[in-house]
Image (spheres, rainbow, N blue to C red):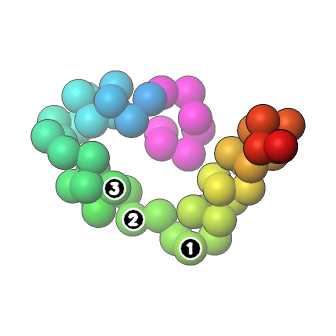
């Protein structure tokens, strides 16, 4: 659900009854590769905004 990018973290936390983002992120246990992919996606979207 998280990796689909269809829902916000707040929406998923509400459904899964997590009170903090830290506990939610601990629960979903992203791999280093998944985190790197997310960072690359953010950079690709905002690349024009950096300079």
Q: Dot 3 surroundings within 10 Å: few (below 14), some, or many (20 or more)?
A: some
Magenta highlight on residue 4: yes
Q: What quarter of the picture does the C terminus occupy?
A: top right
Magenta span main SS = loop
Q: CA distance from mark 3 to mark 2?
A: 6 Å
Residue 10, above or below 42: above
Q: CA distance from mark 3 to mark 1?
A: 13 Å
Left or right placement of residue 48 versus residue 13 in this view:
right
* Residue 21, x across and y down, in percent: 27, 47
The circle on residue 32 is 1
Residue 40, above or below 11: below
Residue that protrudes farthest toward the bottom in the picture: 32
Left or right placement of residue 14 versus residue 38 in this view:
left
**Residue 45 visible in the picture:** no
Give the extent of the magenta segment. 1-7
Residue pictured at 25% horizontal, 55% vertical: 22
Residue indicated by mark 3: 25
* Residue 8, x across and y down, in percent: 44, 29
Look at the numbered disc 2 and give the secondary structure of its residue. loop
């Amino acid at each position: 659900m998280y990796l689909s990018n269809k829902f916000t973290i707040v929406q998923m936390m509400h459904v899964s009854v997590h009170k903090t983002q830290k506990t939610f992120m601990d629960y979903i246990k992203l791999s280093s590769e998944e985190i790197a992919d997310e960072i690359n996606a953010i950079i690709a979207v905002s690349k024009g905004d950096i300079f």
